[in-house]
Image (tube, rainbow, N blue to C red):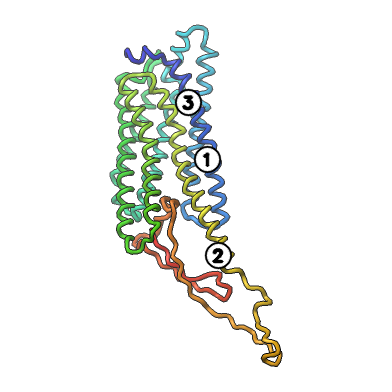
Amino acid sequence: MANSSSFSLPKAELIALAIEGLVFGALTVLYAISVWVFMYRKRAGRSTSSKWMFMTVTSLFVLALVHFGINIQRAIDGFVNHAHTSAETTHFYGQLNNPLHVTKSMLFCTQTVVGDSFVIYRLYVIWDRRKAIIILPVLLLVGTAVSGYAAGIQFALGTGGSRTVFEDDVRPWITSLLSLSLATNVLVTVLIVGRVLWYRNKARPYRTGDSAATYRGAFELIIQSAAVYSAALVSLIITYAAGSNAQTICLDALQPLIGGVLCLIIVRVGLARNLSEDELGSQRTRTHPPPSRAESYVDTGSANDGRTFHLRPMKINVSVVKTRDASSASFEYFDVPEGTSSVVMVKESFDADVERGTCLESRD
């Protein structure tokens, strides 16, 4: 195509490698912080979904790492081993049936499927694990997987000559892959936002003055995470539909960006939650210090003939209203058994040192 010839493929591959390296560097930092968040929460003994989230984000990081390594090797082959003339470099990158190119394409499809699967799982949890709500997203996910792997198979079955990704035998598959993935993310984002609004209205009688900030933080986290990925995906669709080799830049940058968006959610939610819990713990320590053994009795002195009266343990019921901050945007906050009310009453006993008690926890 004319557009693809005006922007050469070797130039696009070189720029794509540089941009992918920058995005992968950001992903590495976010992944390291995410691992710290998971380790902190493990020591605190909480979260039922942390194990699955850790496995998901680790798989996305490994896939992005392998993809980046393949692009480095392809750059060495294209610009060093086949760099006698510019035509040889162009011919090398045009060999779509090259094992490294086929593997790279399969990795992108797998990365997309894993990322979309996690988004659908988040929708499933927020909607109280209702299977009906994820039927359409799952069908879109299956279509995404079929289209992506079919495109990879077409690459592998191609001839050994120089080809482009814009040819008729692969173009429908690639277009379907990108369009279905975008539709999945837009649909899931709309459903999640709708569910959060429903929770907001249902919990209105129990909300306090900080609730507006709480839900504003939830909306920002959901919309921003979806907007980043969707914008990158739209850029890829536009450049591919225009027949420009700039689609290579968008494609390679999107690989680590998928994992980076998930890590960014984990970091923002995890750090906010850990900070709020540390502050709450320090307040409880200052307000209710543990009684010492010496305080377990009262020496009334001469007023009662020097007699000592030992104090008996007394149970205390304390009502504590907890308002979630921006960390309530985490889908784990909604991870409760199906049928559980949005307002959860947890009853516990407090002994004399006020270590435990009755807690009224609002979804707000």
Left or right, 125 with reference to 276: left
Which residue has dot 3 on it? 19
* Residue sitting at x 57%, y 69%: 288
Identify residue type, mark 3. Ile
Q: Residues within 10 Å of mark 3 (few under 14, many from 20)?
A: some
Identified at 39% across, 52% down, the residue is 213
Q: Secondary structure at mark 1?
A: helix
Crowd rating for badge 1 (residues with CA inside 10 Å; few <14, some 14–19, many 20+): many
Residue 122 to residue 142: above or below: below
Task: Determine which quarter of the picture holds residue 172.
Answer: top left
Considering the numbered disc 3 on the image, is that residue within a helix, a strand or a loop?
Answer: helix
Please name which of the two marks, 3 or 2, marks the residue nearer to the observer.
Answer: 2
Mark 2 surroundings: few (<14), some (14-19) or many (≥20) residues within 10 A: few
Q: Which residue is mark 2?
A: 284
Give the structural element (helix, strand or loop) at label 2. Answer: helix
Residue under numbered circle 1: 31
Q: Is residue 88 depicted above or below 217 in this figure?
A: above
The kind of residue tagged 2 is Arg
> Which residue is the extreme one toward the top?
85
Task: Tell me the CA gap for discs 3 and 1.
Answer: 18 Å
Gap in Å between the C-alphas at discs 2 and 1?
A: 32 Å
Q: Residue furthest front?
A: 303
N-terminal label among 3 and 2: 3
The residue drawn where x is 28% and y is 51% is 132
